[in-house]
Image (spheres, helix red, strand yellow):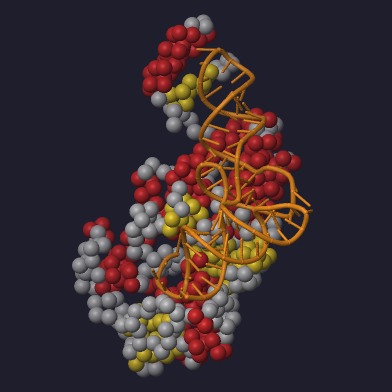
Amino acid sequence: MNIRLFNTLTKRIDAFSPLDPSRVRMYSCGPTVYDVAHIGNMRAFLLPDLLQRTLRVVGGFDVSWVMNITDIDDKTIRDSAVGSEKWRPEMGTQTTDALANLKMLTAFYAEEFHRDLASFNIIKEHFAAQPLATDYIPQMQALINDILASGYAYASDGSVYFNVAAYAKDHAYGRLFTIDTEHFREGVRIDADEYDRESVSDFVLWKARKEGEPYWDYNVNGTNLPGRPGWHIECSAMSKDILGLPFDIHTGGVDLRFPHHEDELAQCTAGYHEHDQATFWVHNEFLEVEGKKMSKSLGNFFTMRDLVAKGIDPLDVRFAMLQAHYRTVYNFTFDGVKGASAARTKIQDYIYDVKERSTASSGSSTLASELRTSVFTELADDLHTPKALAALFSFIGQHAASSLTPDEASSVLGVLSEINGVLAVFEIADRPVVIIPDDVASIAVQRWTARSAKDWAESDRLRAQLTALGWTMNDGKDSYTLEPMA
RNA sequence: GGUCCCGUGGUAGAGUGGCUAUACAGAGCUCUGCAAAAGCUCGUACAUCGGUUCGAAUCCGGUCGGGACCUCCA
């Protein structure tokens, strides 16, 4: 099925097709590993996951998905410095080697990051690579050299800056973001002591070493400029090295459109002489919590760990996020997650029921292909997950599991499995076997006997006992089932 | 200061110039000894004030509110 995507570069929904028909190459801006992921981060990681899954399952493409890990920046340096309050014993023992300290801190949070991704069913097998910025320093330095050679950068006090004005004379700057040059930065406070650059809009490619910070030597025309890479250069160099330019899709949060992505693009044009770093740029909107911007000061800032500690299943959060389109602000609420949990359970139960009715065969049926088409059409339309879920619910409402023939059940199950290949919030499996404790089982037997004898008083007494033990007894026509109460 | 986006029922969240989103929660009904499950039905919605129109929640403008970017930020 053909996939359409909103492209920030063209500012409209375009039909997608990969440059190389054999595979889609996709790069996602990943986390800066100085802390555990919050739910806003999770939404940003959910978008590329949904996208790559949709490309595979709905589009039928092979996907090479790369998500970088930024392990060198102001925050990771700050938090890994000797004497940092953020240092935790689990990270190891700090030494006078600043780079080693940085590596310990970032390795610790990278590990946490992988755990958070896994809890969201974003699985490592889907990644072609998860490169660390510090492993690509030579490539970054080479790119900066190329940009210098092109005349779009200058060195100043040991740092190297990108010259936006010079670049803008020859190339479009502001392709992903409409820059209002008339009022650019008017009224915006600028840290006066921070820069030696020629223009406030110039951005740093290489930052001069500060005492006590990790650094790499960098030979520029015979002069050593010890320092570290700027943030934007990391993604340009890694995406080119791993995927090659231009590649198909670049993803990130809306906040990255400018300056991060705009600058990545400019660097690739200036240094690699590629007009397009990527042909499609896809950005997810932010989320709010209870209608307000998530912030620590408002007390509505939640990490995945916070939610898990509250007893929330991360997959319920994933499901809740699927109910909103990725390009709209999503209002995260605890009631919403509770509702999402109920809704997810309903579909999961349906899947169990269908599985029970299905045969081993995996044929096709009109019903199944209707379901497939209705859901896939929505996913193919700029990842419209809310409509995809609505289509799924409508199908379930119209086709109770009990109404399906075994062959239909088999084919429907196959389609549900395909759908779950994108949504990734269900399990396609037999209903888990409930382990019934002996005392519960024996009371149930007694109650069934009493009930069969129409001894309602005794029957109700025993039901109360089961309820007290946390079990619900469901009376059927000829038999009963027991299930633990939620 | 500039440039944008959004404001839908108890909640989350689609969509559309006149025709059921969907889900959760709630109410009623059916089925049941009772219950559970399941099925059926239902409810008060489109921030506000004007304008355009035969007709607007949907288009235009003002107001109020939330948010984004211009500055590290998913």
Residue A43 position (above or below residue A482): below
Q: If the image is split into quadrants, where does the C terminus of chain A sit?
A: top left
Tell me where residue A186 appears, x and y as whole percent: 45, 80
- The residue lying toward the viewer, choosing from A4 and A146, is A4
The total of numbered circles placed on residues is 0
Q: Residue at x 63, y 72 (%)?
A: A10
**Where, by quadrant of the figure, is residue B31 drawn?**
top right
Tell me where residue A418 appears, x and y as whole percent: 62, 48
Residue A136 position (above or below residue A68): below
Tell me where residue A410 appears, x and y as whole percent: 66, 37
Residue A306 seen in the figure: yes
Residue A277 seen in the figure: no
Q: Is A207 on the left or on the right of A428, as rendered?
A: left
- The residue lying toward the viewer, choosing from A70 and A316, is A316
**Where, by quadrant of the figure, is residue A107 drawn?**
bottom left
Tell me where residue A46 appears, x and y as whole percent: 50, 56
Q: If the image is split into quadrants, where does the N terminus of chain A sit?
A: bottom right
**Where, by quadrant of the figure, is residue A392 drawn?**
top right
- The residue lying toward the viewer, choosing from A77 and A337, is A337
Q: Residue at x 69, y 42 (%)?
A: A368
Q: Residue at x 43, y 24 (%)?
A: A471
Q: Residue at x 65, y 56 (%)?
A: A380
